[in-house]
Amino acid sequence: MIRELMMNAIEAAQHAPLDRRLIEISAQQVDGIPKLAIWNTGPGMDGVELQRVCNIASSLRKQKSLTSNFGMGAKVASLPSNQRGMRYRSCKNGVVHEVILCKRDGVYGLLRRYNETTNEYQEVADVTDLAKSDGRSCDEDWTEVVLHGNTAEQDTVKDPYNGDPEQDTQWLATYLYHRFYRLPDGVKVTLLKGTHKLDGNRPFHTIPSRLHFFERHEPVACANGIKVHYLYDAPYAGTGHNKSISGAIASAVSTCAVIYKTECMMFGEVKTGPSTHPSSASLSVLSTSLCTSNCRTTIRSFLMGIVSSCATLKVSSLTWRQPILPRSSESIARLGLLN
């Protein structure tokens, strides 16, 4: 769900002026309950376009192919967890229109609301004055979606899936960190207060933009053309965490992922630390000197499986992080990953 909504926001923001390619994730109060909202600059939609794009089977300005945004679609992915409603607003040429996509009486569709002025029921409403009263500027085009969840009392910031599955307090930042390996040029994502574990508003930084927090990092070229990015996340002195946790709004756990274009498409993680027994780490890449034979076999099998998938998808790189010992490509070679 979040991936699809974020991809929509990223793709739209890329069409804004270079210094205004913005995405903001916020907690909006709806009858006193926080609801997760994603706002982005980029081409807005008028009432007709907004109504059409919220048709479950439609899209607008989308290129459908395996090499473009190949996700299942924001509406299809999000509606089961937001049957109460997904409120879309879009500003175009200074005018803001709104629709609510929801499920009523067992049927998904646009909510029809009564307009006292026209004495008619309508699916699209002009909410320009309401948007301005909420603090939104109408000086540039933008689009926003607010997730109402499945119940009125559901806090979709902390509990986006209504408990199925449950999420920890830093789920959103961690998901973004583990999903979006890069952002397009000029696109800036900000998590506003209430959507992350720290105070105030915080920018979202991808793994490559935080390399200075890692003690060592290097790319390793494989014979088949795939590049492995090796990052060593050293222990953070005096704590039970790794060094990259400093200033981070996401978790700092060992990870291994396939990178396709800008995204981590296949992802594994395990909570490890300097005192963790290596045999319990099934997905993180550890130092050969600390790995048991079974652990190395598990790691190699996992990575070779995703390398095989890389060949199918024409993926060009992998990435992983590990917290045990700093090693070079020699360690990776001894694991048999470069053969």
Image (cartoon, helix red, strand yellow):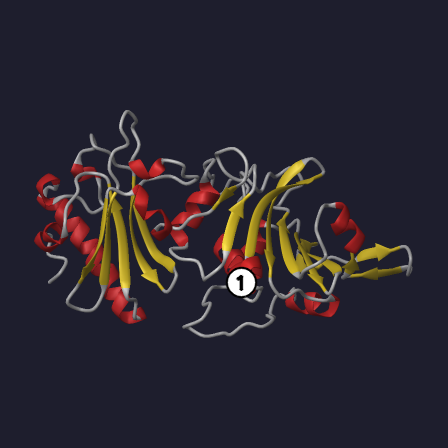
186 lies above or below 311 = above
Report x, y in % for residue 191: 53, 44
Residue 251 sits in quarter? top left
Residue 100 sits in quarter? bottom right
Front-most of 275 and 81? 275
Residue 127 visible in image? no
At 69% from the left edge and 35% from the top edge, which residue is drawn? 32
Report x, y in % for residue 182: 40, 57
Front-most of 72 and 222? 222
Quarter holding the C terminus is: bottom left
Report x, y in % for residue 165: 47, 42
Report x, y in % for residue 120: 87, 61
Q: In terms of secondary structure, where does tag 1 sit?
A: helix
Residue 221 as seen in the image, left or right of residue 179: left
Q: Residue furthest front?
A: 19
Residue 313 sits in quarter? bottom left
At 66% from the left edge and 62% from the top edge, which residue is drawn? 141
59 lies above or below 90 = below
Residue marked by disc 1: 18
Going by the numbered disc 1, the residue's amino acid type is Leu
How many marks can you see? 1
Front-most of 204 and 305? 204
Residue 107 visible in image? yes
At 44% from the left edge and 39% from the top edge, which residue is drawn? 249
At 57% from the left edge and 64% from the top edge, which residue is drawn? 17
Residue 323 as seen in the image, left or right of residue 107: left
